[in-house]
Amino acid sequence: MWQVFWTSRLVVFLSGVFAVLLFGAASSGGGGNDPFGLTRPFGFFGNLLVSPFARWDSSWYLLIAERGYGNNPERAEFFPLYPLITRVVGHIVVSDLIAGLLVSLVSFAIGLFLLYRLVELELDGETARITLLLIAFCPTALFFSAVYSESLFLALSVGCFLQARRGRWASAGILGGLAALERNSGIMLVVPIILLYLYGPRQDRPPPGPRDSSWVRRLIPRYPIRPNLAWVLLVPAGTLLFLISLSGRPGFSFTSAFDAKKYWLHYFAGPYGGVWHGIVAAWDGIRQIVHGPAPPVYFRPAIGFFDPLSIAGQNLILFGFLVLGVIGLIGAFRRLPLAYGAYALAALAIPLSYPVTWQPLGGLSRYEAVLFPLFMWGALWVRRRNITTASVASLAVFLGLFTAEFATWRFVA
């Protein structure tokens, strides 16, 4: 586990630093996306060293850590647990940026450790090792060491799963509640907790008997409902706590955490409606690339944001992540217990139901990075074909490229 952690973080660090030295920051980055200079509080050398870890949304997490939510309802898009912990650690190390980096790195190390234990319990040690390699070197694994909430959410969600798998429902509920206080998709952990409780597999109680082969009878819960299932209520309580805390602030309401999506150009497209919009954007992206620079602009919602060719390329890349995610989701349902695939499907509901106007699948690659059931199936697939080394090497190349983009303020969705 430790080797996976430090080698993957070394790829991120070196790729980011060398990219900044070679290419500098893009004109769209820097001050425009960080007007308070929260991602560059040091001199040239210090800012160079932290460049792979603090860009784009990092400025929002640091702003909330330093100044709270204020009277700015757009900040409600960012749930409070990560910036709160960052602020607490920041008082100790006298730098919120360094604190955020430490929180992310420690959380990622814990997440990898817990994930190894979970996959080892569910499958075996070798598959667990490959799972760690795939998730640590995936192209968007750069966010696990950035001042972003991904690593903390990974640790909390995997910990919740592991405790539920062991039948420790109180601690599963507590970790799930913290995950729901950490990001909007955390509330979806209700789904796997209930499924593991009713259908297993569970370590706290032996299976009640052989599983019926009839799919109709398999819908009947294998375990009876007992009072300890009530611990699952702690998960929505985490989200509810955040909503209540916002409702008493000037300029906010009880629904501000959901309303904030409009400030970031998200719109509701129906359940998983973003899939169709992503397909359309990818097709228009192909047309734009084949044609060349505008005019015409084939994906008109992108007008006024970025270069049409850049948007076309990003939409195609995001569509690729969608395809891989769907394949992994199908594989998780086929090869893993029901709770794993159901959790991944539920967690994807938010990004795929609320697409972004100018980039329908925006953020999907980051959302998928924390969906460990997809990587568990990926590890099974890679191991069966004996292509672990080639797969990890390929992923590492893309991780380096994505990090170079991120560190130089070029947009990485």
Image (tube, helix red, strand yellow):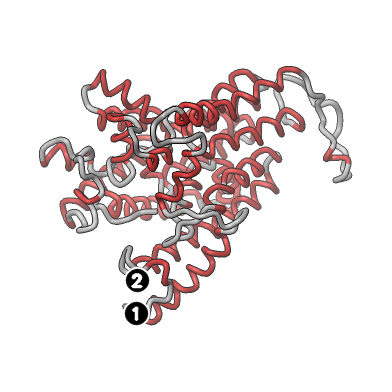
Which residue matches tag 2? 309
Q: Where is 380 relative to 201, above or below?
A: below
Q: Where is 381 relative to 162, above or below?
A: below
Q: Nearer the viewer, residue 383 or 217?
A: 217
Left or right: 374 as drawn, with respect to 358? right
Task: Of the two numbered discs 2 and 1 on the same chain, state the one appearing first in sequence.
Answer: 1
Picture residue at 79% right of the left edge, 24% below the top: 225
Helix, strand or loop status at disc 2: helix
Residue 405 is at least partly visible in this image:
yes
Amino acid under label 2?
A: Leu
Picture residue at 25% right of the left edge, 45% below the top: 14
Picture residue at 71% right of the left edge, 22% below the top: 229
Q: Nearer the viewer, residue 70 or 296?
A: 70
Helix, strand or loop status at disc 1: loop
Distance (Cα) linking label 2 and label 1: 7 Å
Q: Measured from the top left, where is residue 219 in percent x and y?
A: 83, 40
Q: Measured from the top left, where is residue 264 in percent x and y?
A: 40, 51
Mark 1, Cα crowd under 10 Å, few <14 / some 14-19 / many 20+, is few
Is the residue under label 1 in contact with that under label 2 (CB below 8 Å)?
Answer: yes
Q: Measured from the top left, where is residue 11 in percent x and y?
A: 31, 45
Which residue matches tag 1? 292
The N terminus: image quadrant: top left
Amino acid under label 1?
A: Gly
